[in-house]
Amino acid sequence: MDIIVVGGGITGVSAGEWLRRDGHRVTIVDRIAPGDPGQTSYGNAGLLACCAAVPVSTPGVWKKAPGMLLDRDGPLFLRWSYLPKLLPWLLPFLRSGRRGRVEQIAAALLPLIEDSVEQHKALARGTPAERWIRTGEYSYLYADRTAYRRDAFSFDLYRVLGIGWEEREREALLEIDPAIGPAYGFAAVFKDHGWIADPGRYVADLAAWFEAQGGTLRRVEVTDIHPLDGGRAAVVAGGERLEADRVVLAAGAWSARLTRRLGHTAALESERGYHLWLCGPSIRPPHPYMLADAKFVATPMDGTLRCAGLVEFGGLDASASRAPVEFLRRGVRKLYPALEWEGEESWLGHRPSTTDSLPLLGPSPKAPGIVWAFGAQHLGLTMGPKTGRLLADMIGGRMPNIDMAAYRVGRFDR
Ligand SMILES: Cc1cc2nc3c(=O)[nH]c(=O)nc-3n(C[C@H](O)[C@H](O)[C@H](O)COP(=O)(O)OP(=O)(O)OC[C@H]3O[C@@H](n4cnc5c(N)ncnc54)[C@H](O)[C@@H]3O)c2cc1C
């Protein structure tokens, strides 16, 4: 088939490459180059978060959120003028934090993330991108055991889902990483995780491989997508109409701008996040740390240290805020009081998040030639290669070996 993939982030490049390996003629269309800082896939924390099945909206979040927003030292930020636009998304998002619903969501997220390291290796094997994959532990750092117990809801759910971890007291932490400051005295350590030592260059390498093996990359903005007769579809890009047997919509947080005419609700919002990327740091963690109080991950990346996370609501168009970056700066000094560095980059990215924290994957019931592939929220890097494989299965008429019902397009339609 002739297939157009809109979006060349980790989702689009993974889908494009698996489709190409299936023998299709694939064109990835993006307004910027794969791996460009304008993509969310460029600046994330790099974590292959095989364990992270518990979504952000959990029981009690609706009670904690207002206090977090007003707290200058909290990890949640809001452009207040954006609140009226946010509410139609925010209310169902908070409603999906009910205990029973979170259990369903976690069970549906798990098959997309649990074998992430293997999925990345399978995608990158034999390509230049392979060199960026690292494997090892992933630790949640807490002030002490009492702080850890406050996250009992998540850890109880991990246990139910069969996800194991090890508890580590401060002495054991210091044996591995003597520079950790006194603010952190306890860790929950997950084994067999992975991370990407430079997510932007990883995506760029995968895309370059895709092109070298016969795929096509086109750098142009898509302004419209519409169905054609016979289950085919077309995109309008740079004033030109491009027709294909299938169009895969993998435009991340911007996808909803292209779905408006397709007759489905996408329930998509940007959960804005930030990174502070330190060059020449005097200290680097041995593996990624999630600072449980500050809600960001500190990841060792190829001689550098990247601190990435936080949530800000403010939409796709507002410029970056200063407060989240300052928050990351204070946070990394709390982790490593003696840390010094030579240079830094700060960055804003847009997580594509649905109200139920599950992606929209598969053909549109109203326009089967258009296949949706977005909404991976905080886990898009983790689930990108698996998502690409599942899409290739669906497009190729092979039954995916997991139940795709939870990700179905049209589930938010009224
Ligand atoms: C601070 C932060 C930390 C994160 N940490 C992690 C982590 O550690 N692990 C993890 O798994 N996930 C993490 N994430 C989430 C992850 O980065 C995203 O879920 C993922 O990158 C989404 O990938 P994508 O390919 O769907 O979207 P993107 O990477 O945003 O790509 C979408 C592409 O579509 C293109 N596009 C959009 N509209 C058009 C158009 N009209 N025409 C042409 N092209 C278009 C854009 O230019 C862009 O290149 C993090 C996110 C943030 C913000």
Image (spheres, helix red, strand yellow):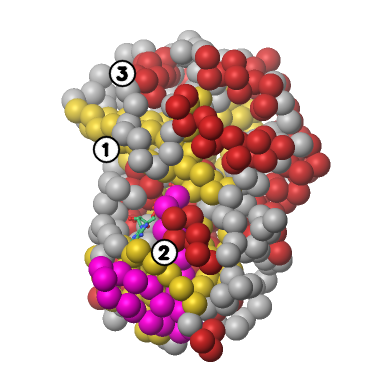
Q: Residue 303 carries which label?
A: 1
Instruction: Using residue 385 as the reference point, say whether residue 92 is left or right of it.
Output: right
- The residue at the point 50 percent across, 59 percent down is 260
Q: In which quarter of the image is the N terminus?
A: bottom left
Instruction: Using residue 232 as the reference point, say whether residue 359 is left or right of it.
Output: right
Q: Quadrant of the C terminus?
A: bottom right
Amino acid type, mark 1: Gly
Q: Mark 3 Cα within 10 Å, few/some/many (few <14, many 20+)?
A: some
Amino acid type, mark 2: Gly
Q: Position of residue 301 (x, y in %)?
A: 33, 40
Figure check: 131 above or below 378: below
Q: Position of residue 62 (x, y in %)?
A: 67, 27
Amino acid type, mark 3: Leu
Q: Position of residue 244 (x, y in %)?
A: 41, 82
If you read the primary sequence from the N terminus, does the residue marked by circle 3 or circle 2 appear first? 2
- The residue at the point 48 percent across, 82 percent down is 228
